[in-house]
Image: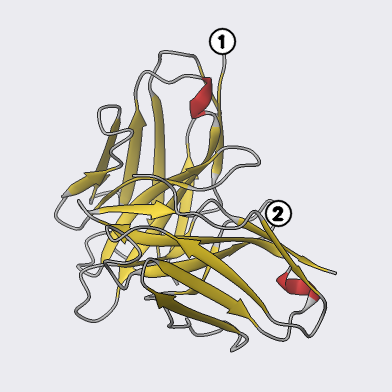
C-alpha cells in the first residue's frame, strides 16, 4: 500500500521560497507507471495542479506558475520535493502530494493516492 | 489554462439521482479521455471516484458513474445517501502535458 507524507515549514515569509517534501513509502518513485504531482488548495477554494515529475525526472508545470515552481526527486530517499519561489499571501494553501497513476498503456491517468496535505501560510 | 466549469452546488433527497457537469474545451475535456472525478469531505484529502471518464476504482460504489459528451463530462450519483454529502471536483488532462481541475461542486443531501 503506497503512502504519501508531506512535510515542511508551516510558515513562510513573503518573497521567500516555499520548500516541501513528499516521502513515499510502500512503493518506489521509480515506477514507470507513475507520475508524482503537487496540488494545492487555498482555504475554502478549489484544487490547483502545480506540476509533476516522472520516474526519469522529467517535469511538467502549470503554465500559470511555470517560472516559480520546481519539482525534483531523490531516488535514494524515495521522495519528491516542491520549491515555489517569490511567494505571496496568495500562495497560502494546503499543499498535497499525489500519485498520478497510468493504467495499462495509457500515457496519462488520474490522481489515485493523496497525502494528507500540509498547510503553508505566507505571512511576515 | 482556465479551471473547468462546474455548478457551485447541487442538492437532492436521499434515494434520488443527481448529476454534476464539468465543462471545458477541446484542449482538455473534449480532446482526451482522461477525465476523473474526486470526492472531498471537509478536512480530508480528495479521493478518486471515477477515472478515464467512466471507470470506477475498486471499492467505489456502483452508484457513482461518469460520462462525457463533447466538451462536457458528467458525474451521476444514484441512490443518493447522506455519506455522499461532500465537495466534488472534476479533473482533465490538458494539452502541453498539464492537468486542470474543475471549480468544484458542493453536494447537499436534503
x 56%, y 10%: residue: A124
Up-down relation of residue B108 to residue B57 (above or below): above
Mark 2 vs mark 1: same chain? no
**Residue B73: where, in percent of width, then height?**
45, 70
**Protein chain holding label 1:** A
Q: Most extreme residue toward the right, as rendered?
A: B110
Please tell me whether mark 2 or mark 1 is closer to you in this view. 2
Q: What number is the disc on residue B42? A: 2
Decide which of A31, A60 is in the foreground and name it: A60
How many numbered marks, from 0 up?
2
Q: Most extreme residue toward the top, as rendered?
A: A124
The quarter of the image holding the N terminus of chain A is bottom left
x 19%, y 79%: residue: A105
**Secondary element at tag 1:** loop
Up-down relation of residue B56 to residue A47 (above or below): below
Decide which of B12, A13 is in the foreground and name it: B12
**Secondary element at tag 2:** loop
Decide which of A115, A40 is in the foreground and name it: A40
**Residue B39: where, in percent of width, then height?**
59, 65
- Is A4 left, or right, of A103 in this rendering? right
- Displayed quadrant of residue A94: top right
Q: Residues within 10 Å of mark 2 (few under 14, many from 20)?
A: few
x 35%, y 37%: residue: A82
Q: Residues within 10 Å of mark 1 (few under 14, many from 20)?
A: few
Q: What number is the disc on residue B45? A: none
Q: CA distance from mark 2 to mark 1?
A: 28 Å
In this figure, which residue is indicated by the disc labeled 1? A124
| Callouts 2 and 1 close, C-beta under 8 Å | no
Amino acid at each position: 500500500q503506497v503512502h504519501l507524507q508531506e512535510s515542511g515549514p508551516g510558515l513562510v515569509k513573503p518573497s521567500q521560497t516555499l520548500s516541501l517534501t513528499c516521502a513515499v513509502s510502500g512503493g518506489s518513485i521509480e515506477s514507470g507507471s507513475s507520475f508524482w504531482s503537487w496540488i494545492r488548495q487555498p482555504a475554502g477554494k478549489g484544487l490547483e495542479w502545480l506540476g509533476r515529475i516522472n520516474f526519469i525526472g522529467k517535469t511538467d508545470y502549470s503554465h500559470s506558475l511555470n517560472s516559480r515552481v520546481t519539482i525534483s526527486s531523490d531516488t535514494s530517499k524515495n521522495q519528491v520535493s516542491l520549491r515555489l519561489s517569490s511567494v505571496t499571501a496568495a500562495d497560502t494553501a494546503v499543499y498535497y502530494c499525489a500519485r498520478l497513476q497510468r493504467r495499462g498503456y495509457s500515457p496519462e491517468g488520474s490522481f489515485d493516492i493523496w497525502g494528507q496535505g500540509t498547510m503553508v501560510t505566507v505571512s511576515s | 489554462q482556465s479551471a473547468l466549469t462546474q455548478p457551485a452546488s447541487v442538492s437532492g433527497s436521499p434515494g434520488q439521482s443527481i448529476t454534476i457537469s464539468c465543462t471545458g474545451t477541446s484542449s482538455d475535456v473534449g480532446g482526451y479521455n482522461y477525465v476523473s472525478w474526486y470526492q472531498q469531505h471537509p478536512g480530508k484529502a480528495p479521493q478518486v471516484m471515477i477515472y478515464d471518464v467512466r471507470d470506477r476504482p475498486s471499492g467505489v460504489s456502483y452508484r457513482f458513474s461518469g460520462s462525457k459528451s463533447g466538451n462536457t463530462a458528467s458525474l451521476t450519483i444514484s441512490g443518493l445517501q447522506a455519506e455522499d454529502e461532500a465537495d466534488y471536483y472534476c479533473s482533465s488532462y490538458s494539452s502541453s502535458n498539464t492537468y486542470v481541475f474543475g471549480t468544484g461542486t458542493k453536494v447537499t443531501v436534503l
